[in-house]
Amino acid sequence: MSDPAAHPDQPAETIRLRPALENLPAYIAGKPAADDGIHRYKVSSNESHLPPIPSVRDAAVAAMESSNRYPDASAQQLRAALGQKHGVDPAQIALSTGSVAVSGDLVRAVVGEGDEVVFAWRSFEAYPILVGSHGGTPVPVPLTAAGDHDLEAMAAAVTERTRLVLLCTPNNPTGPSLSTEQVEDFLARVPEDVVVAIDEAYREFHDPATVLGTAGIFRRHGNVVLLRTFSKLQGLAGLRIGYAVAHPRLARALGQVTVPFGAGAPAQAAALASLAPEAAEELERRAERIRSERSRVMAGLREQGWELPASQGNFVYFPLGERSGEFAEFADARGLVLRAYGTDGVRATIAEEEANDRLLAIAGEWIAG
């Protein structure tokens, strides 16, 4: 933020800002690596350490040839492909600049001034920002000691003012996931006019044998909406594209409130190319490597004496409480940039093998000291 005193020629501002912004938390992105001569691995953001698949990159580059034109606002090709993937009408796919933007559209579509949105905490950093910035009332419900959603407490937090519930599975930043049975039991306790969004940004990293059966849940419940992204496994975080799978009425509402032309042409082309069979096969191989590395890292940490939440994401979480910042600084000095969450804990993304080895070495040194 610029210092007004440094620009004395600027006129005084007497504009009125919305009161809701006064206490709104700021989104804190993953810390970049410092340029001080120390070779660091940046694992503070849940992004892929691998570049896009060549065919996906080529599709995005080719789309740049027509970047003087607006992208297809209806994203017909991509929505048709995603509709086929999820077994729904293409009109039930709502696209925007990442699943976080779709989450914002969801808040705009169903949450009025003072309406409540229930979510677990700690969970995705943007949830309270999206809710508060649009005049809603955030209702954070503490996680269990194991880092899981406390679904019983979340169901009890639903009131007549609740319009939306956000379930992040696997949960970012702690890692545990929800089962189909857990979600079905939860939905049985939530009024059918309350929208329940299942945010699966990290679904591809989950053990396929136990991953949440969201397709069936979606078919059985008219108040469920699914949130997905191309930012993680597909490696398109810099292009910004994600989507929702919604029932028809909600899908139309999302289309009414979204920013026009939000999904750019290169992003649409890259996302579409990533759905091609050959690309999908390579992405599954990448996901398996991440799952394997996560298992190796978790096993190594357990051997060192760490007791961590059972992660199904592309990250691990250290619930260090008051020592979170200290641990992040300890790691930074040894060449690893982590993501500290206040006085709650620290998250490390599973990345290249060398970065994961460094995490194990740093964690071992910390716990031994």
Image: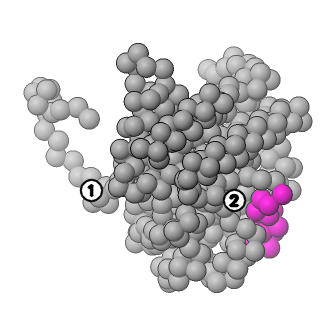
* Secondary structure beneath label 2: strand
Q: How is the image coloured?
A: one colour
Dot 1, crowdedness within 10 Å: few (<14), some or many (≥20)? few
Q: Is residue 94 left or right of residue 18?
A: right
Residue lying at 64% horizontally and 58% vertically, measured from the top left: 310
Q: Position of residue 18 (x, y in %)?
A: 29, 57
Q: Which residues are magenta?
A: 209-222
Q: Is residue 272 left or right of residue 190?
A: right
Residue lying at 83% horizontally and 43% vertically, measured from the top left: 81
Q: What residue type is disc 1 on?
A: Glu
Q: Position of residue 114 (x, y in %)?
A: 40, 72
Q: What residue type is disc 2 on?
A: Leu
- Quadrant location of the C terminus? top left
Given residues 266 and 181, the one toward you in this image is: 181
- Quadrant location of the N terminus? top left
Given residues 302 and 196, the one toward you in this image is: 302
How far is disc 2 from disc 1 in space, using C-alphas?
A: 31 Å
Residue 128, quarter of picture: bottom left
Q: Residue furthest front?
A: 368
Q: Residue furthest right?
A: 277
Q: Position of residue 308 (x, y in %)?
A: 56, 56
The residue identified by callout 1 is: 22
Q: Position of residue 321 (x, y in %)?
A: 40, 57
Residue lying at 37% horizontally and 37% vertically, measured from the top left: 329
Residue 218 within the segment the image draws in magenta: yes
The residue identified by callout 2 is: 226
Q: Is residue 215 left or right of residue 115?
A: right
Note whether 361 is above or below 322 in the view shown. above
* Secondary structure beneath label 1: loop
Given residues 246 and 128, the one toward you in this image is: 128
Residue 240, quarter of picture: top right
Residue 251 within the segment the image draws in magenta: no
